[in-house]
Amino acid sequence: MPSSKLLPLVLALFLAATAAPAAENPTRHATPWTTAPDPGEPLAAPPTPVWDAPPAPALRVGWPVNLQCPSAGYPYTPTLFDADLDGADEIFLTGGHTFGLRGDGTFLPGWPTVEQPYMGYGTNDQKPGPSAADLSGDGDVEILWSERDWYAGSARMWCFNGKNLDGTNLPGFPQEAIEAQSNALDVPFVLGDVDEDGDLEAWGPHTRGNNFIHYRVSAFDHLGTRLITTDVNAAENILSLYFGDVDGNGHAEMFAVSFVTPALKLHVFTAAGGEQAGYPITLHTFSGGYLPFGPPVPVDLDGDGNLEILIGHWDGAGSRVYARHHDGTAVAGYPKAIATSSQLYYIALGDVTGDGRPELVATDNHLTGDNRVFALDLATGALLPGWPVNVVGWPEGFPTVVDVDNDGYQDVCVATDAGDLRAFNRNGQLLAGYPLLMAAPSISGVAAGDIDGDGLFELVAATWNGLVYAWDTTGEALPGRADWPLRNVDPWNTGVYGGSPYAAGVLAAAPRLDELALTVAPNPIRGRAEFAIEGALRPVVIEIVDMQGRIVDRLAPASAGRASWSPGTAANGVYWARLRGGAGEGVKFIVLR
């Protein structure tokens, strides 16, 4: 931590070096120091550098990775999660075989799994990705996914699958659905501590038989024991399963939204698989029209501690979003129109404007041939300035909301069946360096995470014939910079925006950087220095910053909080080290001699 003598200086440097660039004047220049200041004297705050154009996103070395898919039409929706707890996310995808990849593009030991090499049929829909968590709190992460019971010759696959990180089967897995070989392709395993025993359970909707009516839900513990199988009405198709405190009683529940013509139903389950008192209820009854490809989105719209359900819908008049409270009553001010002559694809949420409140993000087809991406103010229903934007191909999958250019505002990313990935800023402008090109159509959506532990976001997407791409971005992987990074929001696949138990756990685990002790020895530095971070319960990143605010180097300390740094060609002078990867700021002056 800085000494009390330097604290005002540290604050001034921090405010100057981390201030967001002016919204209306993005092109400014830093003025270099003409003489090196004496580190023993008070220093004036350096100017804040803003480059004419941020570095363009770059395809990572070792990518794309060829999964050797035998055909085309498979989603390979990526889930990113730090499964080995080294500070870098691993990548898990399924499309028949299930794959585990490191950030450098190599396969994890024991992966891919050997199943039927494809799902049994093609699709143009973004199917779910795997779920990942330490189910029992023993420090070992498990990977779970659902597909279907199917075989062709000696190759086969199962509805319910679970692996350890080393690729070995979890106890009891894989498993077929009970009573009949069935289908669990459309809704993921959702993870959550439903019975509040300290361990996570895995709940998954599925069919009875080879059809697409997901009216059954089975739950498993971390030992692979099937705990329950419960049925809703056999005519209802569960669109999605969620985990969160839907009714605001202080306890998270598994709940589902299902559809049986012409109505949407809300089911809230007990830990034993029964319905909570007062459920199921009818959320909304339609007089006609269609649902989008993506399911409804739960979110606490009014800040009262319980969840509302946003419901997309379209018909000949256009597209819109309804909102219902968990008791089925309408939320005031809804429905809100999205567009006329509109076939709605997906809806998602994210704070695009940086005002602390989410905006509605949606994708559609204009019915005149144009595919579009929208961003709307949820309070007024008005389009944000610069939106919608046209995209060349069909924007497959949920839009991803993440700050990829490090301007402090989150951007909207989509992958398309034209084989590209596009990122738009809050004003609807295509970011510099985009679109990013792929060799074939993509229906995977876009996943955002830090796959190399450098403290910056990478973007991951896959083509439907099994090429997986990963690009570096300049966006810092900080809390609050990725509101919708994965298909179902988070690696537990909870599907709840902003208030899931997973999100609460991540927030609680984020270290307070201003409470950590950062030391460096020797200081002044001659040749090599050793950094140490005391008090960090999870990895953070050390940035070496010069007096113009330029990042000279990034260090990813090992799990013990230690990192070595060799200045190389860095000029003699005063630098400061800044911690990234948690809440608050931690800084330390260092001097090169």
Image (cartoon, helix red, strand yellow):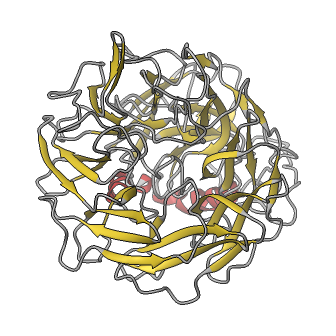
Please tell me whether residue 210 is drawn above or below residue 115 in the rendered image: below
Q: Nearer the viewer, residue 564 or 181?
A: 181
Q: Residue 407: x and y, percent?
A: 71, 54
Q: Quadrant of residue 27?
A: bottom right
Q: Nearer the viewer, residue 23 or 571?
A: 23
Q: Residue 326: x and y, percent?
A: 36, 78
Please tell me whether residue 150 is drawn above or below residue 498 in the rendered image: above
Q: Residue 551: x and y, percent?
A: 67, 38
Is residue 146 rendered to the left or right of residue 343? left
Query: Given the current orientation, which residue lies at the most extreme top position?
Result: 154
Is residue 555 rendered to the left or right of residue 248? right
Q: Residue 118: x and y, percent?
A: 47, 22
Query: Given the current orientation, which residue lies at the most extreme bottom position?
Result: 332
Task: Report the residue at 71% width, 58% height from top.
Answer: 364
Is residue 370 rendered to the left or right of residue 555? right
Confirm whether residue 165 shows in the render: yes
Quadrant showing the C terminus: top right
Q: Quadrant of residue 168?
A: top left
Confirm whether residue 19 shows in the render: no
Task: Report the residue at 52% width, 38% height from top.
Answer: 542
Task: Report the residue at 41% width, 86% height from top.
Answer: 329
Q: Quadrant of residue 358?
A: bottom right
